[in-house]
Amino acid sequence: MRVLGIETSCDETGIAIYDSEQGLQGDALYSQVKMHARYGGVIPELASRDHIRKTLPMIRQLMEDSGSPASSINGIAYTAGPGLIGALLVGASIGRSLAMAWNVPAIGVHHMEGHLLAPMLEANPPSFPFVALLVSGGHTQLVAVTGVGEYRLLGESLDDAAGEAFDKVAKMLGLAYPGGPRVAALATQGTPGRFVFPRPMINRPGLEFSFSGLKTAVRNTLIELGKQAELTEQDKADVARAFEEAVVQTLVIKCRRALQYSGLKTLIIAGGVSANKRLRASLQEMVDSQRSQLFYAQPKFCTDNGAMIAYAGCQRLLAGQHEGLAIFARPRWPLESLSSLRQSAAPLST
Ligand code: KG4
Ligand code: ZN
């Protein structure tokens, strides 16, 4: 089965074609980052309008580049939520309409399920069951996964998501949006140990996270430093380093706990923050000490992309799931409410 995937939930237009027999046929990404950067964050209305401009031409181009004419496409997967409603509606309307024109089934995919399954696109994919750490701009969740659509939430952030904390600290440091990768780059120049920020909630049992106190600690440190003298680049790098270490160590401690509590031996990390090199290295050390295994997607499939949506949609379409003619989009959508593939009707033939 060959599936066209469309991702338009936020500020990236991602298009991909995934084939269940032959793997990924091609993917294309257009980032709106430059357009939103001068406002310091995503402006929803501008995002929707830009998706309208980009989605169809990108689909046309990718079909041509990957040698996938309309007649070869057996299904369409679009991100149906969670995300910005206007942006979601662009991908949903285009996806649903193309499916009607081509007379193929369409499926609305959960954005975080897309992220969660992205490591499956790699040459050496993980097998179920596993613990998933989802760390993006909007979510920080630990999930026990026994199959596609079988998600049990183990813990999540009570306030900011990890990516959001990176973005807010970037702003405090005067770095451009989106800040995560920039804070990470600055942190490589930082002096380890000059500052030590709190590791939020590690002394409490359980698997919840909280990043707003850490953010405040960073703000207070910057204010104190600013009272003494103008902040130097080294000061900023040292703060970035200490902040990144605090986030990474907190995530590592909770992941170790999740593996221990669940008795599972496989950890996957997904979402934009899973591209973070220090996080990957620290988690690798931790899983080695636990005789467990770590999996993640290549960096371009950690952040938003069409390939993860095409892949996730393909699994559901193969199991016989699809939407009716309604255009389906929801800004809020709990991951745990998704249906398991085992509950599906008759599977489609490939
Ligand atoms: O998954 P994603 O592309 O979009 C959402 O679904 O939110 O994640 C974006 C988030 C942003 O907060 C961004 O700053 C963060 O991921 N991010 C990073 C890195 N790359 C992206 N954070 C830390 N280190 C990185 N290398
Ligand atoms: Zn995302």
Image: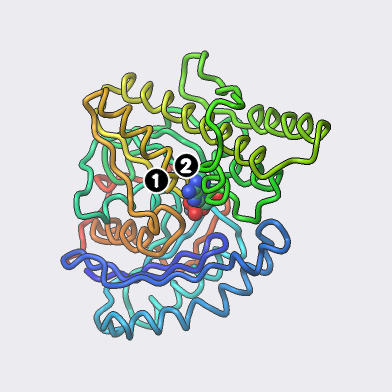
Q: Is mark 2 within 8 Å of ligand 1?
A: yes
Q: Which label was assigned to residue 270?
A: 1
Q: Which residue is mark 2?
A: 135
The quadrant in which the N terminus is found is bottom left
**33 horizontally vs 154: left or right:** right
Q: Nearer the viewer, residue 36 or 263?
A: 36
Dot 1 lies on which element?
strand
Tally of numbered tags: 2
Q: Residue at x 48, y 67 (%)?
A: 326
Q: In this rendering, would 72 be left or right of 93?
A: left
The image quarter containing residue 312 is bottom left
Measure the C-alpha gap from mark 2 to mark 1. Answer: 6 Å
Q: Quick check: is the Cβ at mark 1 less than 8 Å away from ligand 1? A: no
- The answer to whether residue 332 shows anywhere in this view is no
Q: Residues within 10 Å of mark 2 (few under 14, many from 20)?
A: many
Q: Quadrant of the C terminus?
A: bottom left
Q: Earlier in the sequence, mark 2 or mark 1?
A: 2
Q: Count neighbours of disc 1 (C-alpha within 10 A) and say few if under 14, some if 14 to 19, many if 20 or more.
A: many
Residue at (58% x, 65% y) in the render: 87
Compared with residue 295, is residue 285 higher up or lower down, i.e. above or below? above
Residue at position x 33%, y 51% from top?
Answer: 297
* Type of amino acid under label 2: Val
Residue 65 in view (yes/no): yes
Q: Is residue 40 above or below residue 71?
A: above
Residue furthest right in the image: 227
The residue at the point 32 percent across, 25 percent down is 259
- Amino acid at dot 1: Ala
Q: Position of residue 347 (x, y in %)?
A: 20, 58
265 vs 341: above or below: above
* 91 is higher (above) or lower (below) than 158: below
Choose between 34 and 7: the one closer to the eye.
34
Q: Indicate the position of residue 314 as horizontal and vertical percent values.
A: 29, 61
